[in-house]
Image (tube, coloured by chain):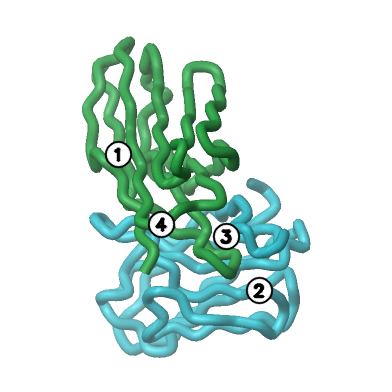
Chain colours: A green, B cyan
Amino acid sequence: GQQVMQIPQYQHVQEGEDFTTYCNSSTTLSNIQWYKQRPGGHPVFLIQLVKSGEVKKQKRLTFQFGEAKKNSSLHITATQTTDVGTYFCAGPIYGNNRLAFGKGNQVVVIP
Amino acid sequence: DAGITQSPRYKITETGRQVTLMCHQTWSHSYMFWYRQDLGHGLRLIYYSAAADITDKGEVPDGYVVSRSKTENFPLTLESATRSQTSVYFCASSESQGGGGQPQHFGDGTRLSIL
């Protein structure tokens, strides 16, 4: 079945540094979505990318959708303690409104 | 998001008991979903619903029952709880637009412990 994989699974990042998390799909996606879950919280939708090669920015976060629409990345600059949490990517499962979620990238920020 | 609420937030019960987790959304979204989240497994889909009276199995449906008599409600029942069903349960909803996988909006979750 369709799989979405995220690497790395865990990251420890020094406050102020940049980091990137990656998402790869076994199939071509019509769109890719990113979610953030704070510790003890629930997943919150961040952004959706639709076009091949699309790049979107939200303040210090830059999201990119690959040319082949099978991979995506999230790059965070000047990491802050508020960036702590787990970042999930998700892609639609063809033919219905379900999403295939990756297992997430848990980010710990070191002050 | 205030538009989707889950109850209870915390629940402790014993093996063999029946327990129902409630989910209510005010957006009139067509789709609703139930996930469980366990360490190392991410979010796993239990059941989902495309509309009132339409439900379908997800990845891990065994031991669970759902119903959707009204668009806004999507309760999840564990008919005879087992320890392996100890987990955090999230309800989510999304709009329906051509089946293209619309963004999902999650409730705060129910933390269920089965002793």
Identify residue type, mark 1. Answer: Gln
Distance between mark 2 and mark 3 Cα atoms: 12 Å
Quarter that holds the C terminus of chain B: bottom left
Label 3 belongs to which residue? Answer: B92
Instruction: Please state which amino acid type lies under the numbered disc 3.
Output: Ala
In the image, A23: left or right of B32? left
Along the viewing direction, whichever of B85 and A8 lies nearer the viewer: A8
Q: CA distance from mark 2 to mark 4?
A: 23 Å
Question: Secondary structure under badge 2?
Answer: strand
Q: What residue appears at the point 65 percent right and 58 percent down from the top-left corner? A: B94
What residue does disc 4 label?
A27
User: Mark 1 sits on what residue?
Assistant: A106
Residue picked out by circle 2: B50
Asked if both marks, 2 and 3, belong to the same chain, the answer given is yes
- How far, Cα to Cα, is label 4 from label 3? 24 Å
* Mark 4 surroundings: few (<14), some (14-19) or many (≥20) residues within 10 A: some
Labels 1 and 4: the sequence-earlier one: 4
